[in-house]
């Protein structure tokens, strides 16, 4: 084994992962060809990084043929496991970047790192305490956050295994704001929950539902952390992130879709559904997934406010059961409406106030549901 | 050159245009260098963007040079570092409007 590779593996001496994530090809080689110590270290490092760990089949096979214990390498179910990486303005191929904070580790001097860490905790705690869900996959999947992606990067996204945050440019997003919004963090992590449950495809109506569930639970993470009832919540997503020139308060309004900022395109009713082509043209937003999400968002807002109290309780339970047990990858608005009504009946009794609230909400946004007597 | 960005957490479409003849000579030369270095003037088959992960942005870059227009599309995942640098350079132009 070359000295260079050996140095990378033992760079910092920490038992769990290294300060520098070695590139996947190198970890592969060490896992297959290294001595026992190097194999163990390589496999442990691979298990650390969610994005590399999506190659579970290979990892499991290696461990099986080498006779190692998978459970010892993979984070224990039932324990929160956060790590934050600094992409140092790199691009996609530089993910996840340099490990800067691990679970239980000290605060960083970098606010973005601490905000991503704390926001991930708020989301983990919310799902665990309210729905008894252990991380996005329900089995304690490590929360990996990557900050300082790109340069002046006006976005945050879920890449299938980790959350990625830009700094913003002060042209669209205020610099440093993307990691401050707990609902944005909840929104991104909920894409992970959806990935492991309904698997709603990210285009057309299923994509708009995917977006809506992220807004719903992102908003609930915020409401839960603030101890707000449905009446007290502002029902805004990403409040205070946009520069003043965008003329508005937030990215989206769940209570009043279309009013969040100047030119907010969201519809509040099916009559105004934006039937954009589902192609790879950046202008079409995969068939308007961030636009048409306004309709199911409003249905949730109406349900939560009609029922009253804390939105994460009745309304949130209904939506949670719907997402995790009732929807599939191609579910459309009609299916979701039907499923939420059935979930309400299942959880709170057929013909109850909850079921009625759900049915009325969907009717009001133009997605009527026939309820069997 | 026109850069169109869409999708993202905000779901907005933003278009940024740069005309080299509206730039000071040094900047115009830099633009040409970046565009050429990114392979955007080549006649290779135009790339289309693959489907994106949730809230990922996608990009379309159109370059008009001597009467010919060439368009390529990228997702966040396929965006080459050279094009990423070109976009960053464009964004740092002081005349960039909000959004």
Image (tube, helix red, strand yellow):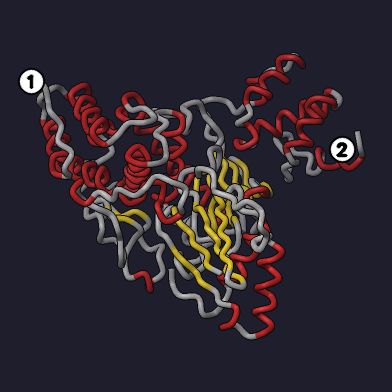
Seen in the picture, residue A220 relative to B83 is either above or below; the reply is above
* Quarter placement of the C terminus of chain B: bottom left
Decide if residue A205 is on the left or right side of residue A118: left
Q: Is residue A355 visible?
A: yes
- What residue is shown with label 2? A6
Residues behind callouts 2 and 1 on a single chain: yes
The residue closer to the viewer here, B48 or A244, is: B48
Q: Earlier in the sequence, mark 2 or mark 1?
A: 2
Residue beneath the point at 19% across and 29% down: A341
Q: Position of residue A103 (x, y in %)?
A: 59, 40
Decide if residue B46 is on the left or right side of residue A308: right
Q: On the image, which quarter does residue A15 sit in?
A: top right
The 10 Å Cα crowd at callout 1, few under 14, some 14 to 19, many 20 or more, is few
Q: Are marks 2 and 1 in contact (CB under 8 Å)?
A: no
Q: Position of residue A61 (x, y in %)?
A: 69, 18
The residue closer to the viewer here, A20 or A28, is: A28
Q: Secondary structure at mark 2?
A: helix
The 10 Å Cα crowd at callout 2, few under 14, some 14 to 19, many 20 or more, is few
């Amino acid at each position: 084994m070359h000295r260079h590779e050996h140095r990378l593996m033992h760079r910092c001496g920490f038992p769990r992962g290294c300060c520098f994530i070695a590139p996947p090809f190198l970890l592969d080689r060490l896992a297959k060809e290294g001595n026992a110590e190097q194999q163990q270290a390589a496999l442990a490092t691979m298990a650390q990084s969610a994005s590399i760990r999506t190659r579970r089949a290979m990892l499991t096979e290696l461990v099986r043929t080498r006779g190692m214990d998978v459970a010892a390498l993979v984070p224990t179910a039932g324990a929160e496991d956060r790590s934050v990486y600094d992409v140092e303005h790199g691009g996609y191929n530089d993910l996840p970047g340099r490990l800067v904070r691990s679970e239980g580790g000290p605060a960083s001097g970098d606010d973005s790192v601490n905000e991503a860490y704390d926001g991930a905790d708020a989301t983990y705690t919310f799902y665990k305490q309210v729905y008894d869900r252990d991380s996005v996959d329900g089995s304690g999947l490590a929360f990996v956050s990557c900050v300082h992606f790109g340069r002046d990067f006006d976005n945050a996204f879920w890449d299938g295994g980790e959350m990625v945050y830009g700094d913003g440019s002060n042209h669209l997003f205020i610099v440093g704001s993307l990691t401050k919004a707990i609902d944005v963090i909840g929104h991104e992590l909920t894409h992970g929950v959806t990935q492991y449950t309904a698997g709603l495809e990210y285009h057309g109506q299923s994509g708009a539902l995917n977006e809506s569930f992220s807004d719903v639970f992102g908003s609930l993470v915020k409401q839960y952390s603030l101890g707000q009832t449905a009446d007290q919540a502002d029902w805004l997503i990403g409040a205070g992130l946009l520069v003043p020139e965008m003329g508005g308060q937030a990215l989206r309004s769940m209570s009043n879709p279309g009013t969040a900022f100047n030119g907010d395109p969201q519809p509040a009713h099916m009559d105004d559904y934006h039937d954009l082509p589902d192609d790879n043209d950046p202008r079409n937003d995969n068939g308007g997934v961030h636009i048409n999400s306004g309709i199911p968002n409003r249905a949730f807002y109406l349900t939560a406010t009609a029922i009253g109290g804390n939105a994460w309780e009745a309304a949130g339970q209904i939506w949670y059961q719907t997402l995790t047990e009732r929807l599939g990858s191609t579910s459309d608005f009609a299916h979701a409406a039907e499923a939420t009504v059935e979930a309400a009946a299942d959880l709170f009794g057929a013909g109850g106030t909850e079921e009625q609230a759900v049915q009325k909400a969907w009717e009001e946004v133009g997605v009527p549901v026939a309820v069997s007597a | 050159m026109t850069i169109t960005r869409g999708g993202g957490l905000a779901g907005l479409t933003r278009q940024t245009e740069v005309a080299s003849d509206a730039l000071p000579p040094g900047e115009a030369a830099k633009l040409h260098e970046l565009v050429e270095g990114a392979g955007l003037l080549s006649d290779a088959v135009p790339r289309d963007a693959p489907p994106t992960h949730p809230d990922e942005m996608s990009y379309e870059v159109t370059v008009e040079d001597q009467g010919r227009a060439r368009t390529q599309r990228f997702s966040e995942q396929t965006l080459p570092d050279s094009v990423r640098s070109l976009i960053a350079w464009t964004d740092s132009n002081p005349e960039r409007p909000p959004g």
